[in-house]
Image (cartoon, coloured by chain):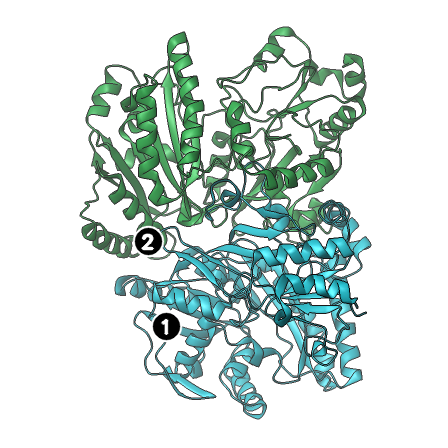
Chain colours: A cyan, B green
């Protein structure tokens, strides 16, 4: 699948010899696919030139930035966007930041916190692209999905540069919609694999007020970190409830009262993962915490803009928790544990421990939308995990799911996953079967549809969206060079 | 167009060709050229609408959807071409769902704010509304037009508060956006406890964004769902008057950034007087004379839990900000109390519509912009007005922070006497000149209406080209409101 010398040379003309590679030893370090070549453009102009060449030579391409996931067809030109890592602008007056694709959330958040601001960091982690669309622990007060994007600079699959909204008309980033119908209708989506073809080269993101310190007072030595003090007007707690219904009732009241800075519906297995530093310690902690909790629960962070605001929020929280029969988990009240959870769950460094550490792999069903509805479904999906736990095929997490309210409970996210050993074929098969069965049940029982499934059946059940999307793709990508879509994970 | 053919497609009872009826739709209060439609149809159901759109495709008949009652102001409901059929859906008035727990309501396109507000209030909800819409304004129409809303704190995305929609595209195909898409029919979704709340998807596209701002050029909407907010149990409204707009803008910025307030907007003295003076003159002039040049209005609210404590802690924080900016919050400006403003803006305008009260007609020029550009743009508009012979002091100005303060809707309301030809021509000329001049100063006309649309859209060829590709997919025969936006 190697490129001919002439074609390779054409791409080399764009990025220079240092930023293109077809070395069969180096390329597999990206992914286990036989790529045509790897190119590393430095800016929008180079991306455009590369995409134009791809059209000329009918060569499929895929842009990738922080690269957490991705499946690639053989012979794909891999656009590694790591050189496009500039924060273009932080506009405090109008509450947005403009970034290139390889700016990671940790980098942008650190800059924002110096200015009393922050952003929505996706649950995949702060090491992922800041412009990634998706959901995260902070959704309660920083929204999620495709709703934080303003203007976007986009190199279309045909190699045209489209600058949406105010960017195209007045060279400013504050609005991504219009004139007239919004191109955000096709430039944004739920999480991959369903993503827009082409390459997003810059995006403006909404930013939010941060009432905390410019940096956390972290002390200790890896992996045993702690905060020297809890920042003023901050508090983190974990509450468990007698039932899922009571938990949701509390969650809704908290959303309506607008008191939570973060509400993360951790299950106790995830708490255990976050406050421990090894699998052995995690397992022991999980067993201990499982005895302390009375049922499902959530982790909550309160943050006051002032002492009075903080005091008010604490009082409301106490009342809501009391009414729902909630109980605070004593372990999290320990300032050392509280502090590090507070830090991890705002800087969003928790995911890797929760997902990869115990088994080496995980298979997840994330669902965005209506929180109570997806909880209903997730209860069944959790019960379906139990036989796998009993057989030792997946890590014991009590069959739990997790999730959180988005935009003060208006929307929500629920997710459930199985952690397993990918080297164990029986475990792998059992997890695949569980995934397929629970996805099918969600569709058949009218809860929601996972779009990674069989497209025809699901498409027909969802207003034939797939047929419309195919037409859009064909119109935008006449040469079919971006068929794998432009994942920016 | 063959009238008989349309009558064969849908019930003849729904069609009218009476000249007086057609004349009603041939012009509005904007300056677009009058064009008389061939007929008017008033569908009652989604099936009627689908039949009409299919008929239009078979016969190449232009369709112009209309959801609000008169008067219309923007030219988008006046046909741009001859032979058009007006599809007036204002008679589709069902309120389909109000769900307190999920904070969502759903209604057909003929439902007005005055009709929906009491229904959502019954269960303790409220709408995030535009500023004092006219009493005949359709809720669906307002949402599809991306009208700014007065509680920027709750506008997370510019598409808010729209949640989901059902539409018949120009092809005649039915489509439901967001969570409403499926699986299952709406009835099946309700049966399992699903409401139509999540706006994104299905799949990669979020097509509610395509039909918003489209002025009916992509299809006809048969219902929408919208997010609602909790009705506060306690509200404390305030006003801050000043001749210094910048100080008020800074104040508004912090109120929104800290999420301390619900309603939050700025009006100049002409607009505030226009809203509250029921007679003109002398009441309008005396009221206006009592008002400061600019008034920032905001309301602090408490909900179910400890409302007094919430309001008091917010007020304490707000007082500190005001003091830092050298401002003072009060309960009234001139002869208008903050409480009166709060009560007024939580309802549609009383009749006659506030924009018609000062002079009988009004032309609006509005755009989105950055906070720091507002002062220069308003100065430029004042100079332009004076040059055109329109006294700048008579011009209404409304500034609405939008999408949680990421930009600002700025609206100039040019009140004029429609019987006075000279005045009318002056306003017409001024509104065209204003678009050109304000664009040069960074104004972004995200909702291009009327004669200036070409000037606005031609600045962004790449967006135009992409929109044209989309239009060809969803309305390949260009039957949906041809001549509007860029189609």
Question: Within the image, what quadrant is residue B441 found in?
Answer: top left
B73 lies above or below A256: above
- On screen, residue A213 versus residue B409, left or right, reads left
Q: Say which mark, if any, is on residue A353.
A: none
- On screen, residue A127 versus residue A25, left or right, reads left
The quadrant the N terminus of chain A occupies is bottom right
Q: In front of the other: label 1 or label 2?
A: 1
Tell me the residue at 73%/84% (across/down).
Answer: A393
B207 lies above or below B487: below
Q: Which sits in the foreground, A23 or A207?
A: A23
Q: Which residue is mark 2?
A: B307
Q: Crowding at label 2, few (<14), some or many (≥20) Cα neighbours within 10 Å?
A: some
Residue B448: x %, y % from top left: 52, 31
Residue A220: x %, y % from top left: 39, 88
A62 lies above or below B261: below
Q: Crowding at label 1, few (<14), some or many (≥20) Cα neighbours within 10 Å?
A: many
Q: Which residue is mark 1?
A: A235
């Amino acid at each position: 699948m190697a490129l001919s010398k002439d074609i390779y040379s054409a791409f080399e003309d764009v990025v220079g010899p240092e930023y293109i590679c077809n070395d069969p030893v180096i390329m597999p370090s990206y992914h286990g696919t036989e790529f045509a070549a790897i190119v590393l453009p430095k800016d929008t102009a180079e991306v455009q030139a590369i995409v134009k060449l791809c059209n000329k030579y009918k060569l499929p391409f895929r842009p990738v930035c922080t690269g957490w996931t991705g499946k690639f067809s053989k012979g794909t030109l891999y656009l590694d966007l790591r050189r496009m890592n500039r924060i273009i602008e932080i506009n405090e007056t109008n509450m947005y930041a403009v970034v290139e694709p390889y700016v990671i959330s940790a980098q942008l958040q650190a800059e924002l916190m110096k200015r009393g601001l922050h952003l929505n960091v996706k649950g995949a982690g702060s090491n992922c692209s800041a412009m990634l669309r998706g959901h995260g622990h902070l959704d309660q007060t920083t929204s999620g999905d495709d709703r934080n994007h303003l203007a976007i600079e986009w190199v279309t699959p045909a190699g045209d540069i489209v600058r949406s909204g105010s960017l195209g008309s007045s060279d400013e980033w504050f609005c991504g919609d219009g004139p007239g119908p919004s191109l955000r209708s096709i430039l944004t989506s739920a999480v991959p694999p369903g993503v827009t073809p082409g390459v997003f080269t810059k995006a403006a993101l909404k930013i939010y007020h941060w009432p905390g310190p410019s940096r956390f007072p972290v002390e200790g030595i890896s992996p045993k970190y702690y905060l020297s003090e809890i920042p003023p007007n901050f508090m983190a707690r974990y509450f468990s409830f007698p039932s899922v219904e009571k938990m949701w009732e509390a969650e809704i009241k908290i959303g309506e009262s607008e008191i939570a800075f973060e509400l993360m519906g951790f299950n106790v297995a995830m708490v255990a993962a976050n406050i421990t530093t090894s699998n052995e310690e995690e397992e022991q902690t999980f067993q201990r915490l499982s005895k302390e909790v009375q049922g499902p629960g959530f982790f909550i962070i309160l943050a006051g803009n002032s002492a009075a605001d903080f005091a008010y929020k604490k009082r409301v929280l106490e009342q809501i928790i009391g009414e729902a029969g909630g109980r605070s988990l004593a372990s999290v009240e320990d300032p050392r544990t509280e502090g590090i959870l507070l830090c991890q769950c705002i800087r969003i460094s928790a995911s890797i421990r929760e997902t990869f550490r115990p088994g080496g792999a995980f298979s997840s069903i994330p669902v965005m939308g209506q929180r109570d509805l997806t909880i209903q479904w997730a209860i069944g999906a959790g019960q379906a995990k139990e036989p796998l736990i009993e057989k030792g095929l997946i890590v014991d997490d009590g069959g739990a799911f997790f999730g959180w309210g988005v935009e003060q409970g208006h929307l929500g996210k629920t997710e459930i996953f199985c952690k397993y050993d990918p080297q164990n074929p029986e475990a792998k098969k059992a997890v695949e079967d569980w995934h397929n069965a629970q996805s099918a049940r969600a569709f058949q029982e009218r809860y929601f549809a996972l779009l990674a499934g069989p497209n025809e059946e699901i498409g027909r059940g969802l207003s034939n969206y797939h047929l419309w999307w195919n037409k859009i793709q064909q119109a935008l990508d006449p040469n079919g060079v971006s068929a794998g879509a432009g994942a920016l994970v | 167009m063959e009238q008989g053919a349309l009558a064969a497609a849908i019930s003849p009872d729904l069609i009218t060709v009476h000249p007086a009826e057609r004349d009603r739709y041939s012009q509005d209060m904007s300056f677009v050229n009058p064009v008389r439609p061939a007929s008017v149809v008033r569908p009652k159901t989604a099936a009627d609408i689908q039949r009409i759109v299919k008929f239009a495709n078979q016969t190449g008949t232009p369709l112009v959807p209309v959801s609000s009652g008169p008067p219309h102001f923007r030219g988008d409901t006046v046909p741009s071409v001859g032979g058009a059929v007006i599809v007036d859906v204002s008679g589709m008035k069902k309120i389909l769902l109000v769900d307190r727990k999920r904070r969502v309501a759903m209604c057909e396109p003929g439902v007005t704010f005055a009709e929906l507000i009491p229904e959502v209030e019954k269960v303790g909800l409220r709408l995030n509304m535009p500023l004092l819409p006219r009493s005949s304004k359709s809720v669906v129409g307002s949402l599809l037009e991306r009208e700014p809303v007065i509680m920027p704190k709750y506008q997370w995305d510019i598409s808010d508060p729209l949640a989901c929609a059902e539409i018949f595209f120009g092809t005649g195909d039915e489509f439901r956006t967001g969570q409403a898409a499926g699986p299952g029919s709406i009835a099946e979704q309700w049966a399992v406890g699903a409401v139509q709340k999540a706006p994104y998807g299905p799949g990669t596209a979020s097509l509610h964004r395509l039909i918003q701002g489209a002025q009916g050029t992509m299809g006809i909407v048969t219902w929408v769902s919208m997010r609602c907010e909790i009705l506060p149990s306690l509200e404390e409204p305030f006003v801050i008057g000043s001749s210094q707009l910048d100080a008020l803008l800074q104040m508004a910025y912090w109120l929104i950034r800290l999420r301390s307030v619900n309603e939050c907007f700025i009006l100049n003295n002409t607009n505030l007087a226009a809203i509250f003076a029921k007679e003109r003159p002398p009441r309008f002039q005396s009221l206006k004379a009592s008002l400061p040049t600019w008034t920032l209005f905001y309301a602090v609210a408490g909900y179910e839990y400890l409302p007094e404590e919430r309001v008091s802690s917010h007020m304490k924080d707000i007082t500190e900000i005001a003091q830092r900016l050298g401002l003072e919050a009060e309960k009234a400006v001139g002869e208008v109390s903050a409480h009166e403003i709060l009560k007024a803006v939580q309802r549609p305008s009383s009749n006659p519509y506030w924009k018609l009260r000062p002079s009988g007609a009004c032309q609006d020029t509005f755009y989105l912009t950055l906070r720091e550009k507002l002062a220069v743009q308003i100065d430029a508009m004042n100079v332009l007005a004076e040059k055109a012979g329109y006294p700048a002091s008579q011009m209404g100005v409304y500034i609405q922070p939008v999408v949680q303060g990421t930009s600002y809707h700025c609206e100039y309301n040019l009140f004029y006497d429609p019987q006075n030809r000279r005045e009318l021509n002056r306003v017409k000329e001024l509104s065209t000149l204003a678009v050109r001049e304000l664009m040069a100063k960074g104004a972004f006309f995200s909702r291009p209406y009327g004669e200036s649309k070409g000037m606005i859209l031609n600045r962004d060829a790449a967006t135009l080209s992409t929109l044209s590709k989309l239009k060809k997919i969803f309305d390949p025969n260009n039957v949906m409101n041809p001549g509007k936006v860029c189609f």
